[in-house]
Structure formats: structure tokens, C-alpha cells
Image (cartoon, rainbow, N blue to C red):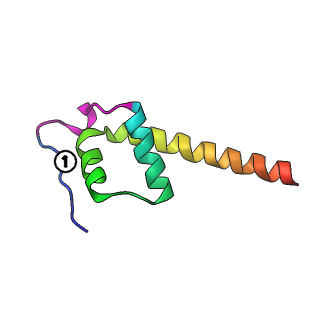
Amino acid sequence: MTSVEPSAKVPATQRKGSLLRTVRAVAWSLIGLRKGAEYAQDVEKLNPIHIIVVGLVAVFTLVLALIALVNWIV
């Protein structure tokens, strides 16, 4: 696995990435299917704070959906 260095020109907290691109990156990461080229683009373009927030919301939503599914079945 190769390491990807973020762009030195733009600090990580000032990167502008769309919400849709961030959601797609988190969704593909949760599934476990990710191309190396897309990962490299995400490292350069997406704000890490946005990724963390979207990831936490996605995990929270997944847990709530699983709880609802179990309650519906039982």
C-alpha cells in the first residue's frame, strides 16, 4: 500500500469538498470497496472534519436502523 501525501498548498481544514462527495467517500469506506485513485483524490480534496462528522452520522444511523430492524422482527 502506498502512502498519499495531501497537498502542501492547502491546509486540511480549508479544503473544499462537496457534501455529496464526502457522503460517497464515507459510504464506500463503510462498505469496504474503494479504489486507490479515488482515495488519493479524497485525501487531496475533502476536509477531514467533514469526513469525521459524516462518518459519525452514518454509523449512528446504521445503529438506529439495526435497532429498529431487531425491534420490528422481535
Is 58 left, or right, of 63 in this rendering? Answer: left
Q: What segment is highlighted magenta in the picture?
A: 9-18
x and y percent of residue 53 in the render? 46, 38
Q: In which quarter of the image is residue 64?
A: top right
Residue 18, placed above or below residue 6: above
Task: Say what amino acid the circle numbered 1 marks.
Answer: Pro
Task: Name the image quarter holding the N terminus.
Answer: bottom left
* Number of residue marks: 1
x and y percent of residue 6 in the render? 19, 47
Q: Name the residue under label 1.
A: 6
Q: Does the magenta stretch include residue 43?
A: no
x and y percent of residue 44 in the render? 22, 44
Residue 70, placed above or below residue 18: below
Q: Is residue 10 magenta?
A: yes
Q: Main secondary structure of the magenta part?
A: loop
Is 60 left, or right, of 42 in this rendering? Answer: right
Task: Name the image quarter holding the C terminus.
Answer: bottom right
Residue located at (19% from left, 37% from top) = 11
Is 10 left, or right, of 35 in this rendering? Answer: left
View extreme (bottom): residue: 1
Residue located at (21% from left, 65% from top) = 2
x and y percent of residue 39 in the render? 30, 52
View extreme (right): residue: 74
Is 39 left, or right, of 6 in this rendering? Answer: right
Secondary structure beneath label 1: loop
Residue located at (56% from left, 47% from top) = 59
Near mark 1 (Cα within 10 A), the count class, few <14, some 14-19 or many ≥20, is some
